[in-house]
Image: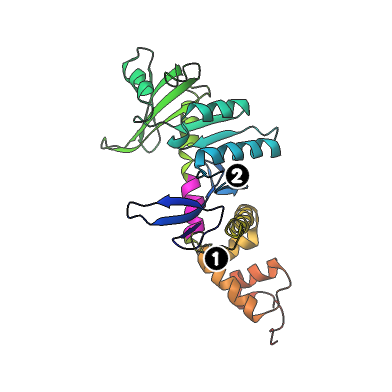
């Protein structure tokens, strides 16, 4: 959310390049609530990745997720949670932390990182196979191994490993992924686990892609300030994104306005133009004006001040 080779503060993380230049950056670790069948996501409070007070080392995603999970469990002590994570977090300390917070997980598993685990998948006689052919004649192939040690260093951490392929009618593999989980893996649960695992992509697409390309301008430098301004601005942006996602899910007048403008970025332009021309009495009048045009109830006298 911020990058500069000159402007910096005490909370900036630093990247030293081979050329000798130093980049100063601010980042966020963002978590959102996702559902495989819903396009909208519900963002939670993001965790800044920044230089922590009293330390000289760069902060990182692994440290940030420890803080984020602690805050999440404190704020939602009774919520049943399945945490979807990419391969960076397929590590003993993270899984142990999730267990301590009574959170289930589906974490992307990479062969290069979990070599011992995949060696067992390829060699074990306990591997199970399952195939589902859906109504579109798409073949969903599963291999899975239950109750196996994560690695030699964390042999007491037992996980279930799922390998999945989506194969089209021509035999071409259209999608491939693997996950580790402590959730029960059976022929009855495999498809739901796969759908949940694939829903992690909504963090990248429906969240970050939207924030970068749909009028929010997440990567734009709105300002750095002397202390925490960049993080405050990003938090405000996530609050705006949260409101929009709730409206996209629940508000019919917002949905009608978006249907008229086609894109969130175009809707932003239309909202700004109306705010410069009229006194807006309420949000419903604003969205009705965008959706219905001149057929809408007049929204107020022109602001000639």
The label shown at residue 222 is: 1
Disc 1 and disc 2: Cα gap in Å?
27 Å
Please rate how many residues cluster around mark 2, counting C-alpha atoms within 10 Å: few if below 14, some from 14 to 19, many from 20: few
Name the chief secondary structure element in magenta.
helix
Q: Quadrant of the C terminus?
A: bottom right
Q: Is residue 236 left or right of residue 37?
A: right
Where 105 sits versus 21, above or below?
above
Q: Is residue 111 left or right of residue 285?
A: left
Secondary-structure class at tag 1:
loop
Q: Residue furthest right?
A: 281
Tell me which segment is drawn in magenta: 202-212
Residue at (47, 56) in percent of width and height: 24
**Magenta segment includes 204:** yes
Q: Nearer the viewer, mark 1 or mark 2?
A: 2
Residue at (43, 24) in percent of width and height: 161
Residue 133 at x, y = what percent? 38, 31
Foreground of the two, 21 or 254: 21
Residue 252 at x, y = what percent? 64, 59
Residue 186 at x, y = what percent? 48, 21
Where 171 sits versus 142, above or below?
below
Foreground of the two, 209 or 91: 91
Residue at (62, 53) in percent of width and height: 242
Foreground of the two, 10 or 39: 10
Secondary-structure class at tag 2:
loop
The label shown at residue 235 is: none
The label shown at residue 54 is: 2
Q: Earlier in the sequence, mark 1 or mark 2?
A: 2
């Amino acid at each position: 959310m911020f990058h500069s080779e000159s402007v910096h503060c005490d909370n900036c993380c630093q990247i030293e390049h081979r050329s000798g230049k130093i980049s100063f950056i601010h980042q966020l670790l963002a978590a959102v609530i996702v559902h495989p069948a819903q396009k909208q996501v519900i963002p939670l409070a993001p965790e800044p990745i920044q230089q922590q007070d009293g330390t000289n080392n760069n902060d990182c995603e692994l440290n940030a997720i420890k803080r984020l999970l602690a805050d999440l469990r404190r704020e939602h002590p009774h919520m049943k949670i399945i945490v979807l994570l990419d391969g960076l977090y397929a590590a003993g300390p993270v899984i142990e932390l999730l267990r301590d917070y009574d959170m289930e997980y589906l974490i992307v598993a990479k062969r290069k990182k979990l070599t011992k685990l995949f060696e067992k998948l390829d060699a074990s006689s306990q591997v199970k196979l399952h195939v589902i052919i859906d109504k579109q004649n798409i073949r969903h192939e599963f291999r899975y191994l239950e109750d196996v040690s994560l690695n030699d260093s964390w042999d007491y951490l037992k996980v279930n490993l799922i390998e999945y392929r989506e194969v089209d009618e021509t035999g071409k593999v259209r999608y491939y992924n693997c996950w580790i989980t402590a959730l029960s893996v059976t022929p009855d649960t495999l498809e739901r686990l796969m759908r949940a695992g694939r829903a992690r992509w909504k963090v990248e697409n429906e969240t970050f892609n939207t924030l970068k390309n749909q009028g929010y301008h997440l990567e734009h430098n709105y300002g750095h300030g002397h202390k925490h301004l960049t993080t405050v601005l990003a938090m405000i942006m996530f609050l705006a994104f949260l409101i929009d996602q709730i409206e996209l899910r629940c508000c019919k007048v917002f949905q009608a306005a978006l249907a008229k403008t086609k894109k969130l970025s175009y809707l932003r332009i239309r909202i700004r133009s109306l705010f410069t021309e009229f006194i807006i009495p309420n949000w419903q009048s604003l969205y009705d004006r965008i959706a219905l045009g001149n057929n809408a109830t007049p929204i107020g006298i022109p602001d000639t001040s």
